[in-house]
Amino acid sequence: MTARPSLLAEGTAAGLAFLASPVAGYFLGKWLGEWAGLGLAPAWIGAALGLAGAFVHLFRLVARITR
């Protein structure tokens, strides 16, 4: 099986999503928590949602590759 350039690009994007999504969710949640006076709970919820989004992206990518 030869690697298509588009799949290589999508795989790289999935790897970056595992780094960027939880970090972005954490900082967005931290900002929201400070703004609303809720502490760090929204930061951890945002990080968890970012990680869940990265996994969804990975599962969709794997499903598309295995078709």
Image: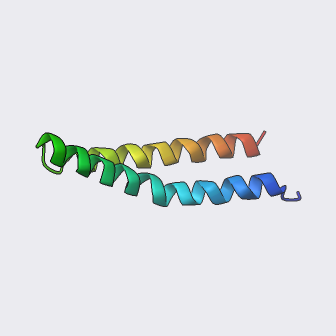
The answer to whether residue 43 is above or below residue 8 is: above
Percent position of residue 61, x then y: 66, 45
Q: Residue furthest right?
A: 2
Q: Residue at x 13, y 43 (%)?
A: 38
Give the left or right position of residue 47, taking residue 18 as reference.
Answer: left
Quarter of the image where the N terminus is located: bottom right
Most foreground residue, 67 or 36: 36
Most foreground residue, 59 or 34: 34
Q: Residue at x 82, y 57 (%)?
A: 5
Give the left or right position of residue 3, taking residue 36 as reference.
Answer: right
Does any portion of residue 47 appear in the rendered image? no
Percent position of residue 62, x then y: 67, 46
Percent position of residue 28, x then y: 32, 48
Most foreground residue, 42 or 2: 42
- Color scheme of the displayed model: rainbow
The image quarter in which residue 60 lies: top right
Give the left or right position of residue 59, taking residue 33 as reference.
Answer: right
Q: How many marks?
A: 0
Percent position of residue 57, x then y: 57, 44
Does any portion of residue 21 appear in the rendered image? yes
Q: Residue at x 31, y 54 (%)?
A: 27
Q: Residue at x 38, y 57 (%)?
A: 23
The image quarter in which residue 66 lies: top right
Quarter of the image where the C terminus is located: top right
